[in-house]
Amino acid sequence: MAKTHVDARAICEELAARSAEALLSKDFESFLSMTQVPTTVETFDGRRQLRTRAEVKETFEGVCDHYARIGATDIVRSVIAAEYVDGTIRGTLECRVLAGQILVRAPFVIYSTYVEEDGAWKVAESSYVCDDAPSYTRALSHGPGARPTASE
């Protein structure tokens, strides 16, 4: 049976919801189960390959710290498009971060590539198109020690 864009969308939607929940609950093991290692993250600040579980955990903790600092209570990721490309899935998502009913920052886009590994789909690479959250992009792009500046 041929794989369709509907199947690709469903996979992206599931991973988007599960990874958002893992970030909000600081559940690294759940997050890791959806992440290929090595994995690549990219922002306007740079591109970084996380080669080990420890590097993924450091970045995960930095992003969780950012969400806690801004009072995030929900991360809503909506799939804009998803398709199969050469055995992978490429997905485009819009991300909204909320504190209660309040949007705490401008929505941004994430482009991700998903691969199937041992029967499970995982995020292999993500590009975050976000230019108004320096502590968030610093946590993604610069790794350990990337902490907010006094103005954040």
Image (cartoon, rainbow, N blue to C red):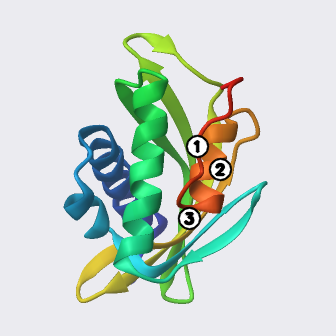
Q: Are marks 3 and 1 in contact (CB under 8 Å)?
A: no
Disc 2 from disc 1: Cα separation: 8 Å
Q: In the drawing, what numbered circle is on residue 112?
A: 3
**Quarter of the figure with residue 86:** bottom right
Residue identifier under label 2: 138
Residue 130, image x, y percentages: 70, 42
**Quarter of the figure with residue 49:** bottom right
Residue 127, image x, y percentages: 65, 60
Residue identifier under label 1: 147
Residue 31, image x, y percentages: 30, 60
Packing grade of label 3 (10 A; few <14, some 14-19, many >=20) is: many
Q: Quadrant of the C terminus?
A: top right
Hey, what amino acid is under mark 2? Arg
What element does badge 2 sit on?
helix
Viewer-nearest residue: 143 or 81? 143
Dot 3 or dot 1, earlier in sequence: 3
Hey, what amino acid is under mark 3? Ser
Depth-wise, is mark 2 or mark 3 nearer the camera? 2
Disc 3 from disc 1: Cα separation: 25 Å
Dot 2 or dot 3, earlier in sequence: 3
Dot 2 or dot 1, earlier in sequence: 2
Viewer-nearest residue: 53 or 117? 53
Hey, what amino acid is under mark 1? Arg
Depth-wise, is mark 2 or mark 1 nearer the camera? 1
